[in-house]
């Protein structure tokens, strides 16, 4: 099961997407940065899959700049790889499953473990 996250480029320190100030969002060439940050990338039209050790990161490329990008992660290591890129470019990461921003300095606080618990909860409800 994928883990959906959104990466934002904003001059605002986003505490909650509910309080997001759209005027502070910064246009960014996410596709270009992501493609230049990773080596093993599978391309199929505008679909991209970054393939790493025990993870993959999927997104749809765009030639246009945007203030955010939706990404699907498979595997915990993908989060840590994205966190390093996010730190380098001062991006912020939102975890769609738990409706919280990920603490880039302490991702264990609200990162993969919470996602794993969320998935287990969904599976048990079925």
Image: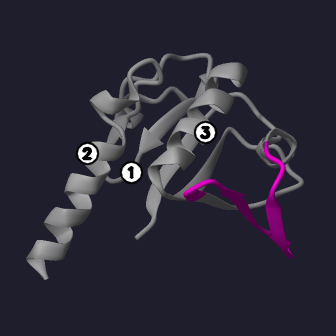
State the residue lying farthest toward the front. Answer: 53
Question: Disc number at residue 82?
Answer: 3
Looking at the rendering, in which quadrant would you find the N terminus?
bottom left
Single out the mark in the foreground, 2 or 1.
2
Residue 2 in the image: x percent, y percent? 45, 65
Q: Residue 46 lies in magenta, yes or no? A: yes
Question: What crowding class fits label 2: few (fewer than 14 Cα within 10 Å), some (14-19), or many (20 or more)?
Answer: some
Task: Give the mark nearest the N terminus, 3 or 2.
Answer: 3
Identity of the residue drawn at 32% across and 53% down: 97
> Depth check: 38 or 2 in front?
38
* Local secondary structure at mark 3: helix
Residue 22 in the image: x percent, y percent? 57, 31
Task: Give the mark nearest the N terminus, 3 or 1.
Answer: 3
Identity of the residue drawn at 41% across and 36% down: 17
> Depth check: 32 or 39 in front?
39
Residue stretch rendered in magenta on the structure: 38-55
Q: CA distance from mark 2 to mark 1?
A: 11 Å
Question: What crowding class fits label 1: few (fewer than 14 Cα within 10 Å), some (14-19), or many (20 or more)?
Answer: some
Single out the mark in the foreground, 3 or 1.
3
Main SS, magenta residues: strand
Question: What crowding class fits label 3: few (fewer than 14 Cα within 10 Å), some (14-19), or many (20 or more)?
Answer: many
Q: Which residue is disc 1 drawn over?
A: 96
85 lies above or below 24:
below
């Amino acid at each position: 099961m994928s883990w959906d996250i959104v990466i934002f480029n904003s001059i605002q320190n986003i505490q909650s997407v509910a309080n997001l100030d759209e005027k502070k969002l910064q246009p960014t060439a996410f596709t270009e940065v992501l493609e230049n940050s990773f080596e093993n990338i599978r391309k199929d039209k505008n679909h991209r899959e970054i393939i790493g050790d025990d993870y993959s990161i999927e997104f749809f490329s765009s030639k246009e700049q945007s203030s955010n990008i939706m990404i699907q992660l498979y595997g915990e290591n993908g989060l840590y790889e994205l966190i390093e890129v996010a730190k380098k470019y001062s991006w912020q990461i939102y975890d769609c499953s738990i409706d919280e921003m990920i603490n880039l300095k302490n991702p264990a606080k609200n990162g993969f473990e919470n996602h794993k618990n969320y998935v287990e909860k969904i599976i048990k409800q079925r």
